[in-house]
Image (tube, rainbow, N blue to C red):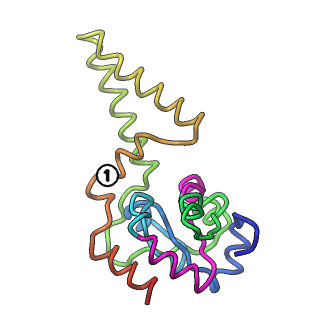
């Protein structure tokens, strides 16, 4: 890969045929729309995929993708620690779709919610629960305060603890067969 550690959506689009694209979002996010030809290896499973990613990087340039660029930057740092060079997509799939570039979705499957939508639902539900329960027990309002504090921390650090927790739910985990097929495709 060139010395740059990131590509804009337009740069990636121009080079898409020569890149091996790895999408590190959850399977649900990946199913909601991914770059053409992208392979799904969720960030939580990156270590398992290191041998396959090393093989893929030896054959050509890797582009790591997520929704915004934060998780893909984390993945690139982890890969760099293992001697694997990869670039991140600046602005992630959000920037990609805003520029009107195509995304692929699996045919005939129900599209799961994107992680940001899952986080909004969970946070909103917890805040509302804290406020309603707080009418009977004042201490329950701390639930709402805790979620609000977590959201502020999330914004300041560009991390999301709630997304990490939600990513562990079964519908956000890759099926073993899917991950095994992806790894075999990368090494084959």
Residue depicted at 54% across the width and 79% down the height: 36
Please tell me in which quadrant of the rendered image residue 40 appears.
Answer: bottom left
Please tell me in which quadrant of the rendered image residue 130 appears.
Answer: top left
Please tell me in which quadrant of the rendered image residue 142 appears.
Answer: top left
Q: Position of residue 66 (x, y in %)?
A: 53, 60
Q: Residue furthest right?
A: 3
Q: Secondary structure at mark 1?
A: loop
**In the image, residue 122 above or below residue 100:** above
Q: Quadrant of the C terminus?
A: bottom left
Position of 170 with respect to 58 (left or right) is left
Q: Position of residue 129 (x, y in %)?
A: 30, 26
Counting labels gives: 1
- Asked whether 184 or 25 is in front, the reply is 184
- Asked whether 63 or 128 is in front, the reply is 63
Residue extent of the magenta highlight: 49-74
- Asked whether 42 or 8 is in front, the reply is 42
Residue depicted at 32% across the width and 77% down the height: 180
Q: Is residue 52 magenta?
A: yes
Q: Quadrant of the N terminus?
A: bottom right
Position of 98 with respect to 53 (left or right) is right
Q: Is residue 132 magenta?
A: no
Crowd rating for badge 1 (residues with CA inside 10 Å; few <14, some 14–19, many 20+): few
Residue depicted at 51% across the width and 82% down the height: 55
Position of 152 with respect to 9 (left or right) is left
Q: Residue furthest bottom?
A: 188
**In the image, residue 50 above or below residue 19:** above
**In the image, residue 12 above or below residue 173:** below
**In the image, residue 91 above or below residue 124:** below
Residue under label 1, please give it.
168
Q: Position of residue 17 (x, y in %)?
A: 63, 86
Residue depicted at 29% across the width and 16% down the height: 140
């Amino acid at each position: 890969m060139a010395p740059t550690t990131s590509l804009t959506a337009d740069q990636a689009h121009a080079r898409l045929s020569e890149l091996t694209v790895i999408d590190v979002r959850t399977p649900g996010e990946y199913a909601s729309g991914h770059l053409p030809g992208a392979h799904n290896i969720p960030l939580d499973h990156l270590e398992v995929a290191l041998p396959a990613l090393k093989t893929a990087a030896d054959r050509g340039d890797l582009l790591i993708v997520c929704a915004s660029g934060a998780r893909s930057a984390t993945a690139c740092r982890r890969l760099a620690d293992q001697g694997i060079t990869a670039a991140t997509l600046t602005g992630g799939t959000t920037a990609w779709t805003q520029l009107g570039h195509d995304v692929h979705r699996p045919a005939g499957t129900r599209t799961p919610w994107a992680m940001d939508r899952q986080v909004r639902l969970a946070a909103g539900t917890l805040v509302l629960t804290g406020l309603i329960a707080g009418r009977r027990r004042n201490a329950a309002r701390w639930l709402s305060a805790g979620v609000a504090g977590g959201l502020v921390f999330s914004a300041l650090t560009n991390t999301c603890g709630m997304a990490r927790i939600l990513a562990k739910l079964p519908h956000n985990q890759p099926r073993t067969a899917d991950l095994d097929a992806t790894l075999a495709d990368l090494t084959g």
